Amino acid sequence: MSLFSFIKKQFIDVLQWNEDTEGVLAWRFPMEGFEIQNGAALTVRESQVAVFVNEGQIADVFGPGNYKLTTATLPVLTYLKNWDKLFESPFKSDVYFFSTRVQTGRKWGTPQPITIRDKDFDMVRLRAFGMFSYRVADPKTFFTELSGTREVYTRDDVEAQLQGIMLSTMATSIGASQIPFLDMAANQALMAQSVKGDLANAFARYGLALDEFNVGSVSLPDELQQALDARIGAGMKGGLSAGKMEGFTRFQTAEAIPLAAQNEGGLAGLGAGLSTGMAVGQAMTQALGGAQAQAPAAAPAPAEDAPEVRLEKLKAMLDKGLISQGDYDDAKAKILQKLIG
């Protein structure tokens, strides 16, 4: 080596990272054109880890502390055999610093509804939002699986991948928990607890530790929310026994009776307007059976006085302007009261 080349060669005598930029998880110390001076100082601050990489392989991992780098004192933790014989003094190596601080207040959400299995509704499509926090727990795995040889790797980079992992894990975890969606929606802490364990395992595969995970809100698509509101209404009216959908069906049938009375064709048009007429007929029988069982048997009314016939006559009189809307509503209410008890 010429005298000019020797003088031109530059050496590094201090390696450290000040974490000047917020949100950086991994940072490569600038080494191009430089060599580490034998006896150089390595400073690793609290909440940091330094990793030496030689020819693409992790050689040593340094936790918080001050180190004097010599071929006699290396390695501290050995991943390569004969590390002290791989380099002359001075030597070259890629050095990466990792932040192990907890990344707090990170937001997660479902841009599109995710579909989960549910014991009550069979399938539920839901949106959910919340917060989570995490940290780099295993720099070797994190380097190998995610950050690689990039100069800078930020939490925005890793969270772009974590979102997909979180959504798929949530769908699997909630579906396998067998906890009814209604229970989880009412108790968001229960939902978070159901997901957190599986999510922590998914994070660990990438060298990350999940610190906190919570669910801030849960929402349903409009059509499912309407069905849920109707089910709640059925329960309030006493037509829904706990955890059973049969009461909901009976409730819908009972609600359909006054609506059918206002339509052309009266109750006779109810079955024609539904593709499942047989199922509706069975549900009506179940819905009305309880009331009939409680009331004493009445003598059969003449055909012309049947409730559906009377409702049709009332509707026709209203349409022709022979009675007022108030008269119609009062008469209809009395007829239906006798019909459904």
Image (cartoon, helix red, strand yellow):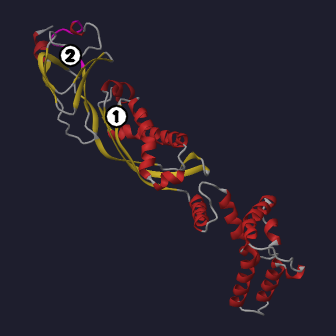
Of all residues, the one furthest to the right in this rendering is: 303
Closer to viewer: mark 1 or mark 2: 1
Where is residue 112? Give x, y as percent.
52, 50
Tell which residue pokes out farthest to the front in this image.
Answer: 296
Q: Which residue is mark 2?
A: 76
Inspect the magenta stretch and tell me whether residue 297 lies in it: no
Instruction: Give the quarter of the image for residue 334.
Output: bottom right
The 10 Å Cα crowd at callout 1, few under 14, some 14 to 19, many 20 or more, is: many
Q: Position of residue 331 (x, y in %)?
A: 73, 86
Q: Determine if the magenta segment contains residue 90.
A: yes
- Quadrant of image for the N terminus: top left
Q: The magenta stretch spans which residues? A: 85-93
Q: Earlier in the sequence, mark 1 or mark 2?
A: 2
The local crowd at label 2, few if under 14, some if 14 to 19, many if 20 or more residues have their Cα within 10 Å, is few
| Three-letter code, disc 2 | Val
Give the CA separation, mark 1 to mark 2. Answer: 24 Å
Nearer to the camera, 308 or 209:
308
Q: What element does badge 1 sit on?
A: strand
* 77 to 194, vertically: above or below: above
Q: Is residue 323 above or below residue 201?
A: below
Tell me the element at label 2.
Answer: loop
Q: How many marks?
A: 2
Q: Quadrant of the C terminus?
A: bottom right
Q: Mark 1 highlights which residue?
A: 209
Position of residue 87 measured from the top left corner of the image (x, y, whole percent): 21, 9
